[in-house]
Image (tube, coloured by chain):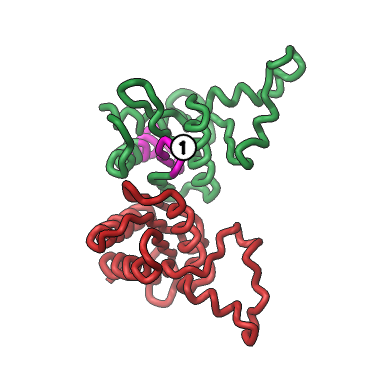
Chain colours: A green, B red
Amino acid sequence: MKKLTLEMAKRALKASERWAREIAGYPCSIAVVNKAGAVIAVHRMDGAAAMTTDIAIEKAWSVVMFKIPTLMLARWIDPRNVGKQLGDHALGMLTKGKGRLTCIAGGIPITDDYGEVIGAIGCSGVPTAVGDISDTSVSQAGWSALYG
Amino acid sequence: MKINLDLAKRLIDSAIKQARDMNNLCSVAIVDENGWLIALHRMDGAVIPTVDIARDKAWTAAAFRCPSSEIAKFGNPSQPGFGLNKENWNGRLTTVAGGLPIKDGDEVIGGIGVSGGTPKQDVAVCQAAIAAILP
């Protein structure tokens, strides 16, 4: 796998939608972006809120920009870390990327055979974040379809 | 009839097939009757800004309930709509042709936006996609 194509993105979205519908049980939006952070495909499932498309796109964009899952970004803006020690938080991140940077769990990177990030999947719309019922697990379902 | 993800996907597939026949690389966006995005695909090799342009066109067509090319008439000083500003509309208002409302009878149920070719080609792709899926 060298680069993401529309065909591959559609395959990932199909698997993610199935997970969202049958296992997570919430309609949501899923976005696939390439290594530049540019959208390849976005789907909003029937019933998902309007805002979720933008959040899904921006989660995927944030993953590509930092090459780590957005779950890890969430640690940077955890207010419980403020004041503990210099470098414990990165609240200044909130204003970066012209406001596009999204530090909410749900985006995961897609890597090539050498571990280089070639794109990302982002999901938004699942209100809980426990195990299989989370944005991250919906994204992971699409991720698995790419490598399976 | 309401627009749903399944219908949106079929419209996009048909539009992309049409664009491929015309040798164009483009992005296709489908929005619901309120202008909110339902599905968006960018063909392999289509340039990056087409994503947002296609979405803007679809939003304009659905929200104003007319083809995006007709928005320019509001800029005519002799018309009552003169003074319509480009800001304050989600930043999405566009006057470029290539966005069409999707209609069920007289009722607007959504919008389609295509970007990648010349405006004329984009309109042809929109029309072909709607004609193929919604008889």
Image position, residue A70 (x, y; %): 52, 28
Quick check: A89 above or below B72? above
Image position, residue A138 (x, y; %): 41, 32
Q: Say whether residue A60 is magenta.
A: no
Quick check: A122 above or below A115? below
- Which span is picked out in magenta? A16-38
The quarter of the picture where the C terminus of chain A appears is top left
* Figure quadrant of residue A94: top right
**Amino acid tagged 1:** Cys
**Secondary element at image label 1:** strand
The residue positioned farthest toward the bottom in the image shown: B78
Image position, residue B10 (x, y; %): 29, 56
Q: Which residue bears the numbered disc 1?
A: A123
Residue depicted at x 30% and y 60%: B15
- Label 1: chain? A
Query: Mark 1, residues whose alpha carbon is within 10 Å: few (<14), some, or many (≥20)?
Result: many
Which is nearer the eye, B99 or B110? Answer: B99
Quick check: A90 above or below B78? above
Residue depicted at x 36% and y 36%: A16
Residue depicted at x 49% and y 46%: A53
* Figure quadrant of residue A116: top left
The residue positioned farthest toward the right in the image shown: A83
A79 relative position to B126: left or right: right
Circle count: 1
Which is nearer the eye, B79 or A114? Answer: A114
Determine if residue B10 is in view: no
